[in-house]
Amino acid sequence: MTQILTKETPAAQSLEAALAALGRAARKAARAVALAPAQVKDQALRVAASEIRRQSGAILAANALDVADARARGTAGSFIDRLTLDPGRVEAIARGVEEIADLPDPVGRLLARFERPNGLVIERVATPLGVIGVIYESRPNVTADAGALCLKAGNAAILRGGSESLRSSRAIHACLVVGLAAAGLPEASISLIETSDRAAVGAMLAGLDGNIDVIVPRGGKSLVARVQHEARVPVFAHLEGIVHVFVHKDADLDMAKRVLLNAKMRRTGVCGAAETLLVDKACAGTHLAPLIAMLIDAGCDVRGDAAAQAADARVKPATEEDWRAEYLDAIIAAKVVDGVEAAIEHIETYGSHHTDCIITRDDAVAQRFMQEVDSAIVLHNASTQFADGGEFGFGAEIGIATGRMHARGPVGVEQLTSFKYRVHGAGQVRG
């Protein structure tokens, strides 16, 4: 029986008891997945991808109901964009699952091998983390991405999507279950919690009686802040993506326009979207006005400092809050800074250590920026929208981790493993 907790769970079975049972089933499944050969895991993923394509109509129908409910509640446009699926996005979900299947198996990788003077041979080998709890909002594609990544890395997954995408997540999860069954893997290898009861999140953060090894939150600042505050297990998380694009004095204007427009406007609701434009004082006279005009003409609201307002009368005054804002919308803050040192200082003061970019033809300046900006992803002459596991060749990602422990940047299959030591001897004893 698929491990799904629904609102229709009999009253006699409390939410706490149901979640505890789900955790135990996931722990048992985790061992089976950890020992599964690569070809078995890959079969499950390829069948799931085929099923996603076959069920595209059903997935889109479920999503249409989710979107309609969200619109009726007056949900913001940026949230609607993250929630909405179309045939192209469903195909991208299926293709992402296939790309994960095509990746090398991360489990069992030999990370290091060395011999001690006493003849002991020590190997460090990649192993699964165990059971991974994923808590997310709005994005139904995370159901497939998270489930597939965890499975590929030899882990069991417990997924808890937002109530706003419940129908969509359920339809996608059903396809993953078909893949698991085809490969002979336990259906509890990828479990979906289907309840809007916030107590379910609290139970996951408590670890489900020791059955969750790590939590990955993917959603708004309030969700991630709650997870980081309450979790009793390790967390891979970022609070927000306050992403900067710095246009250095030696930037090619045409390149700067092309990169900035994509970084901000390709998709405004993703965490890699640019939120602050910094322009070098030394090139503001030639670069600032064209960059701002381009953004405004593309439908972007610009909030700027005095220099930005002087460059274009359509710029609205920026407040202190704008430098710390993750808009996830067609809004950007713009500021003139005095060189690369001031740009780095601004980013370190207001940034979130997610993704930041410099546009310049000066390689030495770019090297300094990339060395001194302490963000998970730092780019030179490339759009910040490349902050994505798929674009890194990871197949997909569960999220972008901005912490400094274990995983950082896109969390893909390799980041979802740990390691153990294997020590080979020939009868040695310690003196």
Image (cartoon, rainbow, N blue to C red):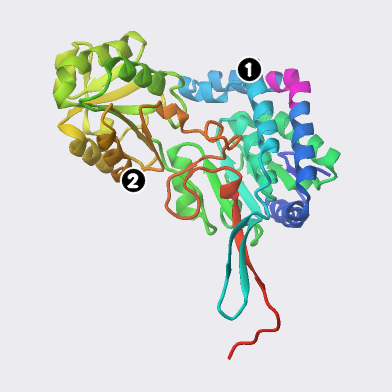
* Magenta region, main secondary structure: helix
In the rendered image, which quarter contains the C terminus? bottom right
Location of residue 81 in the rendering, given as x and y in whole percent from the top left corner: 52, 21
Q: Mark 1 sits on what residue? A: 88
Alpha-carbon distance for marks 2 and 1?
Answer: 35 Å
- Image quarter hosting the N terminus: top right
Residue 135: x and y, percent? 57, 43
The residue positioned 42% from the left and 52% from the top of the image is: 404
Q: In this view, does 231 lie above or below 75?
A: below
Residue 103 lies, in percent from the top left, at 66, 39
Q: In this view, does 275 lie to the left or right of 148?
A: left
Q: Residue 374 carries which label?
A: 2
Residues at marks 2 and 1 touching, judged by CB atoms closer than 8 Å: no
**Looking at the picture, does residue 38 appear above or below residue 291?**
below
At a point 66% along the width and 32% down the height, the residue shown is: 99
Indicate the quadrant where residue 47 lies. top right
Report helix, strand or loop for mark 2: loop
Instruction: State the residue lying farthest toward the top.
Output: 297
* Extent of the magenta region: 52-60
Q: Which amino acid does label 2 sit on?
A: Asp
Query: What secondary structure is marked by label 1?
Result: helix
Q: Nearer the viewer, residue 404 or 249?
A: 249
Q: Can residue 76 be seen in this view?
A: no
